[in-house]
Image (cartoon, grey):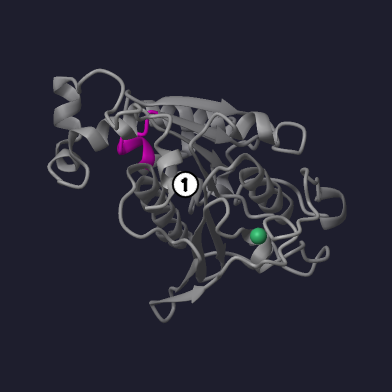
């Protein structure tokens, strides 16, 4: 794929193209056997995954399936940003959490669940809101960012931080019975190419106001996990410059081309945005994971 994809693998691959680190253990060879038997993955690809670092923004509806599949796949370090606690109303879609964790921080619930799914995975948690003050520090240590937030301040902040840091961003959104997914690679477009600025406060109902079919989270969050693994392994054709639209009622997938906009205020030819912006104040929406 592109040079960006090589950058994705840059932290997990040696300069001669071989993967750093030790050979797979016997248990790992068994655990990942169905990956390793795929010629496109193999032992080298599996070791790349084990050396990879993926950050999840939000441990909610989208972050739950994404985290479970990425951990099961053997992504070596999974970071999770979420400062919310598990609530009963989360459980119809946030499948990483369970009854026993109601009232506990979501990051603790995630850490324990992922340790059970795959002890190979190091889980790094950030039990704090992401903002202009910490976004660069949190994101810079990861290879790919998966956005599972449902609010505009976080969406714009993460988009801008990923672009400015040169990090691939795997985006997903949900609304009632519909979902969207796409990938932004630095230099090949960003969220602001589609929507240059956030909508005014109250213009778009939140997930809590509009509702969402819980199982939709599994569809879109799993697509995000698949796209992330493809990026990490430089496989196939990523959802770059392509917005995938899923309508669960008609059970139709459509695709819309989204080229980079030369007029984009962030990634365009004459950018006006050079630093992170906290939109919370005038968007008027609480900054939480898809909830
Ligand atoms: Zn852009």
Is residue 142 located in the magenta-colored stretch of the structure?
no
Q: Residue at x 17, y 23 (%)?
A: 27
The residue closer to the viewer here, 259 or 200, is 259
Question: Which corner quadrant of the figure contains ligand 1?
Answer: bottom right
Q: Mark 1 points at which residue?
A: 4
Q: Is residue 77 left or right of residue 40?
A: right
Residue 95 visible in this rendered orientation of the protein: no
Which type of secondary structure does the marked residue at label 1 adopt?
A: helix
Of the pair 114 and 39, the residue shown nearer to us: 39
The residue that appears at 49% across and 61% down in the rendered structure is 182
Q: Residue 197 location, x and y as percent? A: 77, 62
* Residue 178 visible within the image: yes
In the rendered picture of this protein, how many numbered marks are placed on residues? 1
Using a 10 Å C-alpha cutoff, classify the residue at mark 1 as few (fewer than 14 neighbours), some (14 to 19) or many (20 or more): some
Q: In which quarter of the image is residue 258?
A: bottom right
What residue lies at 31% left-to-right and 51% top-to-bottom? 235
Q: Answer with left or right where residue 10 lies relative to residue 58.
A: left
**Which of these two is toward me, 272 or 289?**
272
What range of the chain is rendered magenta? 70-76
Above or below residue 219? Residue 67 is above
Q: Where is residue 129? Give x, y as percent.
A: 70, 36
């Amino acid at each position: 794929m592109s040079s960006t994809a090589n950058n994705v693998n840059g932290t997990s691959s040696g300069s001669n193209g071989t993967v750093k680190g030790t050979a797979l253990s016997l248990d790992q060879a068994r655990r990942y056997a169905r990956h390793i038997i795929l010629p496109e993955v193999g032992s080298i690809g599996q070791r790349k995954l084990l050396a990879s670092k993926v950050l999840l923004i939000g441990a909610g509806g989208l972050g739950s399936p994404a985290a479970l599949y990425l951990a099961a796949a053997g992504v070596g370090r999974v970071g999770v940003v979420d400062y919310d606690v598990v609530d009963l109303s989360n459980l119809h879609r946030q499948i990483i959490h369970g009854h026993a964790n109601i009232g506990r921080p979501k990051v603790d619930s995630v850490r324990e669940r992922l340790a059970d799914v795959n002890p190979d995975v190091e889980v790094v948690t950030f039990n704090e809101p992401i903002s202009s003050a910490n976004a660069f520090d949190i994101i810079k240590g990861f290879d790919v960012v998966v956005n599972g937030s449902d609010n505009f301040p976080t969406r714009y902040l993460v988009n801008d931080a990923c672009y400015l840091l040169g990090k691939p961003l795997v985006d997903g959104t949900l609304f009632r019975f519909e979902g969207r997914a796409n990938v932004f690679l630095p230099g090949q477009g960003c969220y602001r190419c589609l929507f240059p600025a956030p909508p005014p406060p109250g213009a778009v109902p939140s997930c809590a106001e509009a509702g969402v079919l819980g199982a939709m989270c599994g569809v879109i969050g799993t697509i995000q996990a698949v796209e992330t693994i493809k990026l990490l392994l430089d496989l196939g054709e990523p959802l770059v410059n392509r917005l995938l639209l899923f309508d669960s009622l008609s059970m139709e997938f459509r695709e819309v081309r989204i080229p980079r906009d030369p007029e984009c205020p962030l990634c365009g030819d004459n950018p006006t945005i050079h630093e992170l912006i906290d939109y919370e104040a005038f968007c008027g929406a609480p900054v939480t994971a898809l909830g």
